[in-house]
Amino acid sequence: MYLLLALVVVSYVNAAALTKPFALQHLAADLISYQSNVAVITETHFKNAHTDAITSIDGYKLYRRDRLRRRAGGVAVYVRTTLPSSEWIYEGDDRLYEVIWVRVTNVFIAAVYHPPKPLYRAEQLLDYIESCVDALNHQYPTANIVIAGDTNQLPERYLTERTGLAQIVLQPTRGANILDRVFTSGPLYNVVRVVQSTGKSDHKAVIAYCSSDQAAKSHTKTLTRLKYRRKSPTQNALFLQNSFSVDFGCGQPFGEVQSEFDCFYNLATCLLDTFYPERTITVTSRDPPFVTADIKAKLRRKNRLMRKGRVEEAGALAKIIGNDIRRQQQNILSRIDHKSDVKQVWRVVRELTGKSQTGSASVQGITAYTLN
């Protein structure tokens, strides 16, 4: 699950593994689409082998707490780098619980995952969260508190009674159940949406924001205007219907090759401009390399649908965007000759994963000669 917040936009998502192929790219697309300042993620499935260089998203700082000595689980919080943030650690911190606290400006945000089969009793988790909230209220009496996460079958009234926080998610997030919840200490967000995320997960994403908020903007990004042609089933049908009646021979069955080609090209361009007119869209330097003009346009449309409350249409479009991202990354890799240009392969892999190149370590006394 993930929660996307706008301040803070907050997004919350049960990712069902950010270690899956293209999962981080799908999350990055959602962050761009919803202009999220904070993303709360549960079930990251991160382990020690997943370094921050691999799990990072450009423009966001990552805070994570991985599950110890067991597979799956884990929580994380991505915060926009333009916002001041830091991890807050409770003096009685216990790694038995999958809970991480992050301070963003004057808001303390907790990512919580309560698995179906925990190693502790539910009362112990409630005691721990209550102690954390009490400590925050004592140390920072004017701060706001947000707790977001997948609490599974833990009744929300227990957490509300213990902490005094209000639960603001009112729509089902998995099937007919509200398993993914957001608790706040005050009226921070007046709009809460439950939408289909771009990535593959049986949980829906929760988007919370204040309608008067403006997402933080970076003054260092560069803008590029790109052209694209929007395609829809209606446009395809009209194109096919009208293209049958077009004479591509231009009435010159034995004309010169160049003039015939020029005629065909002009007719084809005219058909494209008529049924698929060119549009322009702005892509920034902060957008990942897999975000094409067409994908950026779909992300913006999904955001508009979500803000208008048309969440079912936004969810359907999210699935299309997820497939487009997978195809785009596969196309990038397929154009590389992996047999003759290994360096190019790894350069593209680093671009797609966000992992920087590291220097090779040398071991004293070990050379190619001694190994052979």
Image (cartoon, rainbow, N blue to C red):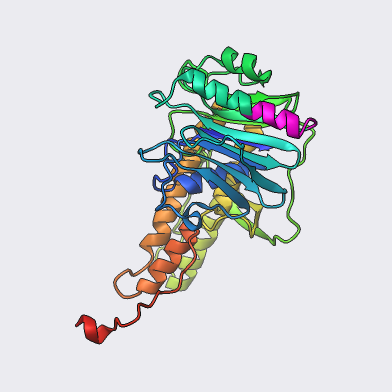
Q: Which quadrant of the figure contains the C terminus?
A: bottom left
Q: Nearer the viewer, residue 297 or 250?
A: 297
Residue 60: horizontal and vertical position, in percent? 62, 51
Q: How many marks?
A: 0
Residue 351 shows in the view: yes
Decide whether residue 141 is among the magenta residues.
yes
**Whether residue 28 is situated above or below residue 350 in the rendered picture:** above
Residue 21: horizontal and vertical position, in percent? 39, 48
Outermost residue to the front: 92
Is residue 215 rendered to the left or right of residue 228?
right
> What residue is drawn where x is 46% and y is 53%?
247
> What residue is drawn where x is 62% and y is 31%?
207
**Whether residue 94 is situated above or below residue 310 in the rendered picture:** below
Q: Nearer the viewer, residue 357 or 314?
A: 357
Residue 338: horizontal and vertical position, in percent? 32, 68
Is residue 92 rendered to the left or right of residue 175?
right
Q: Which quadrant of the structure image shows residue 136?
A: top right
> What residue is drawn where x is 41% and y is 71%?
344
Secondary structure mainly formed by the magenta segment: helix
Is residue 82 rendered to the left or right of residue 231?
right
Residue 257: horizontal and vertical position, in percent? 42, 71
> What residue is drawn where x is 76% and y is 38%?
106
Q: Nearer the viewer, residue 292 or 50?
A: 50
Outermost residue to the bottom: 369
Residue numbers of the magenta segment: 132-142
Residue 252 shows in the view: no
Decide whether residue 301 is among the magenta residues.
no
